[in-house]
Image (tube, rainbow, N blue to C red):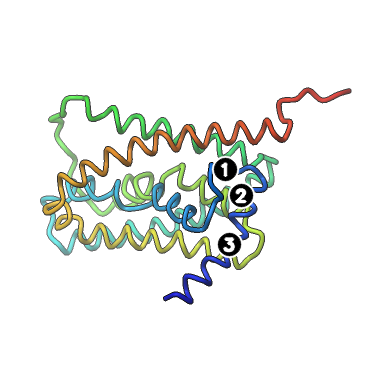
Amino acid sequence: MKRLAAIIAATLVPVAAAAQSTGVLTTRRPLTWGMIFALLFLMLGPIKLLGPFAAATKDCDSIFRRRLATRAFLFSLAAVTIAAGLGKQMLDNFAIPVLVLQIAAGMILFLVALQAVMQQYKPASSEPTEPITLALAFSPLAFPTIVTPYGIAAVTILISLSPTTEASLMLTGVVYFILFLDWLAMLAAHTIVRWSGPLLLLLGVILGVNQVALGLQLMLGGIEGLIAQGAFTPSAN
């Protein structure tokens, strides 16, 4: 296990160094592979998934839940792979700076997280819910609940900063591992919610507030990076 951790660290350190040197995803402390994992876990992880999945499938049997979770997991794998690949290609084709994508990701994360935080102050609606079918595995389960737009942007940024193919593959493995944790969380969602409901509510509030702050940090960091690169300085003609 220690050897595996050392291999992961040695592989992701160049990615962290590239992020720091280019001003992308900058933080007050040096960016480490652990922070990269935490960032991706925050954006793609299962905490935001447990409550909605348990509520949506409360009247379904265990076989249906397993099929829905597995299908959503497979869709998520395909979605994040295709989206990250296309995102990197579009960055290159349209010459979009990675810092601009970071600002866009921060803006989306900020708006989505702020909406989730403010949703707690709205009265609960009693609108009839649609019947649950396996078609929901792709939308809204796989996208945008599991594979969030800002999560895709973060993966695209990190893949673009990867200096080697090995680093890109390792980052892909980290993303797939987080999606695997999502699948396990969906399988155990009802048990987790039953025994940890209040704790999940508290974690949801903390996560929402941190996501609002992270969205602001990404936007400010992207703007600071562009200023440092002279993007807002008029060119002398």
Front in this rendered view, residue 76 or 157: 157
For the N terminus, the quadrant is bottom left
* Distance Cα–Cα, label 2 vs label 3: 14 Å
Kindly identify the residue that appears in the image at 45 percent across and 42 percent down: 149
The outermost residue toward the right is 237
Mark 1 secondary-structure assignment: loop
Q: Residues within 10 Å of mark 2 (few under 14, many from 20)?
A: many
Quick one: label 1 or label 3, which is nearer the N terminus?
1
The image quarter containing residue 118 is top left
Total count of labels: 3
Residue marked by disc 1 = 26
Three-letter code, disc 2: Ala
Kindly identify the residue that appears in the image at 15 percent across and 47 percent down: 197
Place of residue 224 in the rendered image (x, y in percent of width and height, measured from the top left): 62, 32
Residue marked by disc 3 = 168
Kindly identify the residue that appears in the image at 47 percent across and 57 percent down: 34
